[in-house]
């Protein structure tokens, strides 16, 4: 049992690092998921051993990789989006890539030599970083993560990602637009949540806000009481929770009626009414795929069962939008906005697609959607 719990933790840790822009650190076994078991869609799929032919290349982690389940979710989203579109401009060829920089660059060049006219991937931050500096970008290429430490992308390289820093900055802008300027910040101590904290802090203060006090997450009553007592001083008009759902549900009762903001990390998914009551009043942002099942762009796509794994849901949605954006790039229409399932997508001047997310808040156990400018 202990071994099984460890393997599950390793999978969640590495998947979270991948999903929100972190670098891969070590492998986990991971259990077979619904994305792996899905039937093969009726979309033309070329294989890497075929002669050179014009095609769309998917550069995704292979079967012996720590991110296999993540890659399967993305691939399933891409294939299902192609099926719903009804016609595929070019056959799709999947390249199982390894995790090291040299292999990813070599696979990219192999795809070009085999006739790739559009490349979607890589999926990991290390892979995108390697490709960005390789000097090999020769066709429209849609990377699914952000490169590390690169201020300018080469021509033909575009980025569509679920980068958590961008999300935290949107929350900061939302709080400012809603009239708040003095914030308490309560943050967890994982690498992901530290990045959430830093991105919110930078954007909030850049726009004239002030962090009047900051507290690390604690579940101890004495520490939580100190937060509640500090609120009584009246210095803050809001709180930002750089926390995940289990942490936020602990802290929330000590914040009273203070305005509260958070990222998608607090969203419990199908946690039932109790989860909604525990997060009452917390405003957060997430993608339409999870928050708006009746959204026109969401309703038309099949919903595979990921057994409550929200990160796999998000990666599946990323695959859907990646195919739609990639098709637009192939047609020379990459600058058009896309009403996507991961958000309303617009192309920034830096060749990174901006995702305007959906605003949500729990009230009386129910999830309410609101329109934020962000």
Image (cartoon, rainbow, N blue to C red):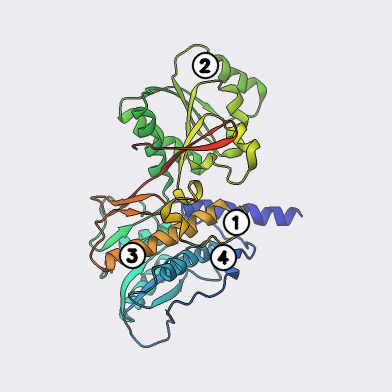
Closest to the camera, between mark 3 and mark 1, is: 3
Quarter of the picture holding the C terminus: top left
Report the disc number at residue 35: 4
Element at label 2: helix
Q: Which residue is mark 1?
A: 11
At 31% from the left and 30% from the top, the residue drawn is 206
Q: Bin the neighbour count of mark 1 within 10 Å (Cα to Cα): few under 14, some 14-19, many 20 and up.
A: many
Q: Residue drawn 37% across and 73% down?
A: 57
Q: Residue at x 33, y 84 (%)?
A: 53
Q: Residue furthest top?
A: 233
- Camera sees residue 341: no
In-image side of 139 versus 38 (left or right): left
Of callouts 3 and 4, the N-terminal one: 4
Hey, which quadrant is residue 179 in on the image? top left
The Cα–Cα distance between marks 3 and 1, rounded to whole angstroms, is 28 Å
Q: Residue under circle 2?
A: 231
> Observer-nearest residue: 145 or 335?
335
- Residue 37 seen: yes
Q: Quadrant of the N terminus?
A: bottom right
Determine whether 11 is above or below 277 in the image: below
How far, Cα to Cα, is label 1 from label 2?
38 Å
Q: Of the residues tagged 4 and 1, which is closer to the observer?
A: 4
Return the mark for residue 178. none
Q: Position of residue 113 (x, y in %)?
A: 31, 80
Q: Nearer the viewer, mark 2 or mark 4?
A: 4
Circle 4 SS class: helix
Q: Which mark is residue 326?
A: 3
N-terminal label among 3 and 1: 1
Q: Nearer the viewer, mark 2 or mark 3?
A: 3
């Amino acid at each position: 049992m202990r071994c099984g719990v460890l393997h599950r933790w390793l999978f969640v840790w590495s998947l979270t690092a991948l999903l929100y822009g972190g670098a891969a650190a070590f492998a986990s076994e991971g259990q077979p998921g619904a994305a792996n078991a899905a039937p093969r869609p009726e979309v033309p799929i070329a294989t890497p051993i075929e002669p050179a032919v014009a095609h769309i290349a998917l550069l995704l982690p292979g079967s012996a990789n720590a991110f296999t389940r993540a890659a399967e979710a993305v691939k399933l989203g891409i294939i299902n989006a192609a099926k719903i579109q009804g016609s595929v401009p070019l056959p799709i060829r999947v390249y199982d890539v390894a995790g090291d920089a040299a292999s990813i660059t070599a696979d990219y060049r192999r795809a070009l030599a085999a006739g790739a006219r559009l490349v979607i991937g890589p999926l990991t931050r290390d892979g995108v970083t390697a490709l960005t500096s390789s000097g090999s970008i020769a066709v429209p290429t849609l990377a699914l993560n952000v490169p590390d430490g690169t201020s300018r992308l080469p021509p033909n390289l575009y980025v569509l990602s679920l980068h958590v820093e961008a999300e935290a900055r949107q929350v900061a802008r939302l709080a400012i637009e809603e009239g708040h300027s003095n914030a308490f910040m309560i943050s967890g101590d994982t690498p992901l949540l530290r990045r959430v904290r830093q991105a919110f802090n930078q954007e909030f203060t850049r726009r004239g806000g002030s962090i009047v006090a900051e507290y690390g997450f604690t579940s101890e009553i004495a520490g939580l009481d100190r937060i509640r007592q500090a609120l009584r001083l009246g210095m803050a008009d809001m709180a930002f929770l750089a926390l995940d759902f289990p942490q936020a549900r602990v802290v929330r009762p000590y914040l009273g009626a203070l305005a509260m903001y958070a990222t998608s990390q607090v969203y419990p998914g199908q946690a039932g009414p109790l989860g909604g009551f525990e997060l009452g009043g917390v405003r957060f942002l997430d993608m339409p795929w999870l928050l708006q099942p009746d959204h026109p762009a969401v309703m038309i796509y099949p919903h595979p069962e990921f057994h409550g794994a929200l990160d796999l849901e998000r990666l599946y949605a990323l695959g859907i939008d990646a195919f739609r954006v990639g098709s637009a790039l192939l047609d020379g229409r990459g600058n058009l906005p896309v009403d996507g399932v991961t958000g309303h997508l617009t192309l920034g001047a830096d060749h990174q697609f901006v995702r305007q997310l959906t605003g949500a808040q729990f009230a009386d156990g129910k999830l309410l959607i609101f329109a934020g400018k962000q």
